[in-house]
Amino acid sequence: MGWHAAVLLATVPTVRSTFGGACSNDSYILPLRRRRIAPSASALESFQQKIIALAQNASALEIGGPTTNIGGLYAQLAWASVDIVNWSEQDGAVTRVETVGAEASSGSAFYVDGRLLGRLRVGDGGRLEHVADGSYDVVMAFHVLEHFADPLRALATWRRVLKPGGYLVVSVPWAENTYDREVPVSTIYDLILAHADAADSSDDPEVLRRLERRVRAYHRLVDLDMCPICSDALATARRLKGYHWHAWDLSLLQEAMACTGAVVEYLDIMDNWHQLVIARVPAGD
């Protein structure tokens, strides 16, 4: 059973700014307090219908895939092509790539049930230096965004490689059912500050001190029984791709998409675990 989200925007004070380039949408209006999300009936069928429609003869890029726990995502949908990007050839997800006559490596052909879908690429899924602008109809990232210290940069990159009118399909874990359940949910302000700090790559001493404090605070709150790899050392946190830099809720997903300039068409919690958003980049971009 999932939750279908309706966003209540009335009476929420706002301010307008691009926030030093953190928001690629120069019309984004920042709320002065968190917008409320009102859950209603399940919308699982609606998500399935939308993803089936999006896949029709579409080119897609999945960050961190291939995802195998969404039934039929590849085998049963009519994608024209799907490319996969992973951090390294040693990632566990890479071993799920079907290849013919070779081990999975950068440039390997990606097959599903014997059908050639696309290629595996190894690289930073938040930068995609090797991907040209406007290359794909759909960019998918399932349980990936929470692993970026600067998620707004990742979202801006994913938007860059989308064709005008293309779609972002993104999921993040519902914090209440993860080791983040005692961790305060980040706000759009936190994401903007992380972008200003270039949190994923900066070597500035003051930025590193702020990040070190954040990592130590997170370590005190996180359920270490569920996350034995969680460390109170910044260098380790940066190295481990499984580290959660931000805890998310539906409100933060909505704001991040608006900041990125993507129009939310679907927002839902599925199976008390997956927070899902489908958002469209305007065709005029």
Image (cartoon, grey):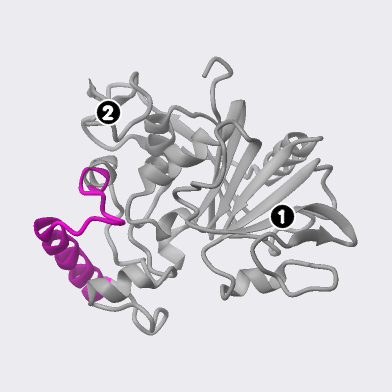
Q: Would you name the residue on which mark 2 appears?
A: 30
The part of the image, by quadrant, that contains residue 10 is: top left
Q: What residue type is labelled 2?
A: Leu
Dot in front, 1 or 2 = 1
Residue 260 location (% of width, % of height): 41, 32
Disc 2 secondary structure class: strand
Residue 102, image x and y in percent?
79, 73
State the residue at coordinates (50%, 35%). Answer: 159
- In the rendered structure, the answer to whether residue 16 lies left or right of residue 102 reads left
* In the image, residue 284 lies in the stretch drawn in magenta: no
Per the rendered image, the range of residues in magenta is 194-221
Tell me which numbered mark, 1 or 2, is placed earlier along the sequence. 2
In this view, the residue in front, 105 or 47, is: 105
Q: Quadrant of the N terminus?
A: bottom right
Q: Residue furthest right?
A: 114
Q: Quickly name the residue at label 1.
A: 119
Residue drawn at x 44%, y 70% as measured from the top left: 242
From the top left corner, tell me how far across and down residue 214 is, in percent. Answer: 19, 63
What residue is at 55 percent from the left and 33 percent from the top?
Answer: 133
> Where residue 276 sits: x, y (%)?
55, 47
Looking at the image, residue 92 lies above or below residue 81: below
Q: Dot 1 lies on which element?
A: strand
